[in-house]
Amino acid sequence: MSAALTAEDVRAIANASGRQAAQEVLASSTTRDLIQGTVRETLLQLGLDPKQPLEAQKDLAALRSWRLASGEIQKRGVLTAIGIMVSGILALLIVGFRTWLQK
């Protein structure tokens, strides 16, 4: 007695076959060499030396640190500007109030 395959069975078989085919393609040395060459060329075009990945990581960490520091400087600059404006307004109010009291 033969059992009919359901749509789910057919999908599972197709997925398993596709995965197996993909693994076979990736396992071939030609494909691996092609992928490695592509990654190497991409890194070189970005200005990174693929032979020194730790140096590239250090460079990217330094850039991140620089970006965070510049954001902090900008935030403190805005707070300083607001503080100066508030101090100026308060000084103007105090001088105006003193002048009003002297009249």
Image (spheres, rainbow, N blue to C red):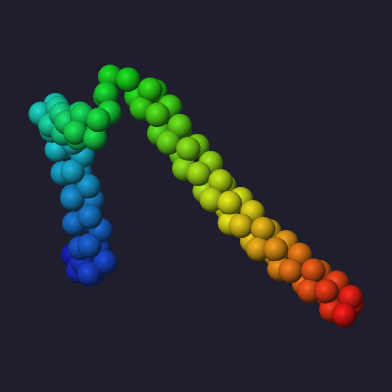
Position of residue 27 relative to residue 2, above or below, is above
State the residue in front, 22 or 99.
99
Residue 5 visible to an observer of this rendering: yes
Identify which residue is drawn at 89% across, 77% down: 101
Quadrant of the image for the C terminus?
bottom right
Horizontal side of residue 75 vs 84, given as left or right? left
Instruction: Please identify the residue farthest to the top as the structure is shown.
Output: 51
Residue 23 location in percent, x, y? 21, 39
Residue 19 location in percent, x, y? 22, 47
Horizontal side of residue 61 vs 24, given as left or right? right
Total residue callouts: 0
Residue 73 location in percent, x, y? 56, 46
State the residue in front, 44 or 70.
70
Residue 32 location in percent, x, y? 17, 30
Identify which residue is drawn at 24% across, 35% down: 46
* Quadrant in the picture for residue 21: top left
State the residue in front, 102 or 86.
102
Identify which residue is drawn at 67% across, 58% down: 84
Position of residue 57 relative to residue 12, above or below, is above
Residue 90 visible to an observer of this rendering: no
Quadrant of the image for the N terminus?
bottom left
